[in-house]
Amino acid sequence: MSISPFQSNAEIISHEDVRTSGTYGKRGIAIVRGLGATLWDADGTQYIDCVGGQGAANLGHAHPAVVAAIQHQATQLISCPEIFHNDQRAAYLDELGAALPAGMGRLFLCNSGTEAVESALKFARLHTGRTQIVAAMRAFHGRTMGALSATYEPKYREPFEPLIPGVTHVPYDKIVALAAAVSDQTAAVILEPVQGEGGVRPASPGYLAAAAEICRQHGALLLVDEVQTGFGRTGSLFAVSQDGVTPDVLIMAKSMAGGVPMGAIAIHESLGGFTPASHGSTFGGNPLACAAGRAALKALIDDDLPAHAARKGQYIMEYLNERQLSKVREVRGRGLLIGIELKERVQPTLVALMERGVLALPAGPNVLRLLPPLVISDAEIDQALAIICEVLT
Ligand SMILES: *Cc1c(COP(=O)(O)O)cnc(C)c1O
């Protein structure tokens, strides 16, 4: 048993702050326990969770099926590199394959979103023999050098330049601008169905389908980054199915394995897969993550959580729109990926919400982002909404 040596927020914070890298701007509480959409700090204060593990906790905290799968698999086998076959991996590939859009038949397993994006970029170079990538302004694809090259935010990119060459950024959701940027030199176009970190911006209906057609005309691949939108978040298991689009590569991570670190790409079967030894990962496809992934996927489907996301998200957006809150410019989103654009900076609102028992996220300087677990109850939603309205009036 890993009994905590600490009793309070203050104790934990003082220890953590001595050795932490310094890259994170942390909030002044220490979260030690969770259940569903409820979190507790070390002082025993309870919160409604609208952070959802930054997108990794679609199933809620301590989901019993995920807990049981992890506990059992830990007694069987935790690590098993892909030089061997494994029962949990084989079952997960079957089950995930069956849940993906038809044709997305080749899977590469890794451990995080940025790693999945790297895998997709490498596959695009390998498959097309080209190096040019077209991404969108305000896009977020991760922090490692390849994924960072496709990420837009200058303050994330500029300290690390030169990044990989050949990446251009076009305005998001603008078909004409995309068509003008893609050529016979383009290896791939990479897009999010809803831009998450970039301010919660859903693409218009038809945009992804147009992107797929533009790619097809030029022999470029369409890489759809569903790291944040996937696994039920926007009202369907994957957002691309709402657009009727089958990507060449679908990029996944965050809630894939019920909160256990995992990422993946699914490659369309018409493209084959990686050539031997062209890519790899030590932890990729490990049995613990695969067992958690199986339990998470089954629970998402059995409990109909994508439909919950659609209904609850629509309720929240209608509720906020009806109130005409004085500090709010616009409410937008899809499913339970919700952005509330404010007329002022979001930071003070995040603090005020936390003081009243609601944890939420920013998405850029002036957007409040709600990303609750899809299992959040109607009562918790109403409680959180009452507090949000109080703070935004
Ligand atoms: C979070 C995110 C990533 C990066 O995932 P990490 O696991 O943090 O590396 C990539 N793309 C999108 C759309 C994301 O939201």
Image (spheres, grey):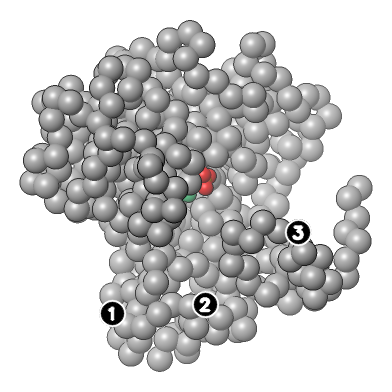
Circle 1 residues within 10 Å: few <14, some 14–19, many ≥20: some
* Residue bearing mark 3: 19
Q: Are marks 3 and 1 in contact (CB under 8 Å)?
A: no
Q: Are marks 2 and 3 in contact (CB under 8 Å)?
A: no
For residue 84, above or below residue 72 = above
| Residue type at the position of mark 2 | Leu
- Is residue 183 in view from this perspective? yes
Q: Is residue 48 left or right of residue 236?
A: right
Question: Separation of disc 2 and disc 3 at Cα?
Answer: 25 Å
Residue drawn at the location 14% of the way across and 25% of the way down = 184
Point out the tag, 2 or 3, that comes first from the N-terminus: 3
Circle 3 residues within 10 Å: few <14, some 14–19, many ≥20: few
Circle 2 residues within 10 Å: few <14, some 14–19, many ≥20: many
Mark 3 secondary-structure assignment? helix
For residue 369, above or below residue 190 = below
* Residue bearing mark 2: 350
Question: Separation of disc 1 and disc 2 at Cα?
Answer: 17 Å
Q: Where is residue 195 drawn, in percent x and y?
A: 33, 54
* Residue bearing mark 1: 329
Q: Are marks 1 and 2 in contact (CB under 8 Å)?
A: no
In the depicted view, which residue is nearer to us: 295 or 268? 268
Residue drawn at the location 48% of the way across and 81% of the way down = 349
Location of residue 34 by image quarter: bottom right
Mark 2 secondary-structure assignment? helix
Give the label, 2 or 3, closer to the camera.
Answer: 3
| Residue type at the position of mark 3 | Arg
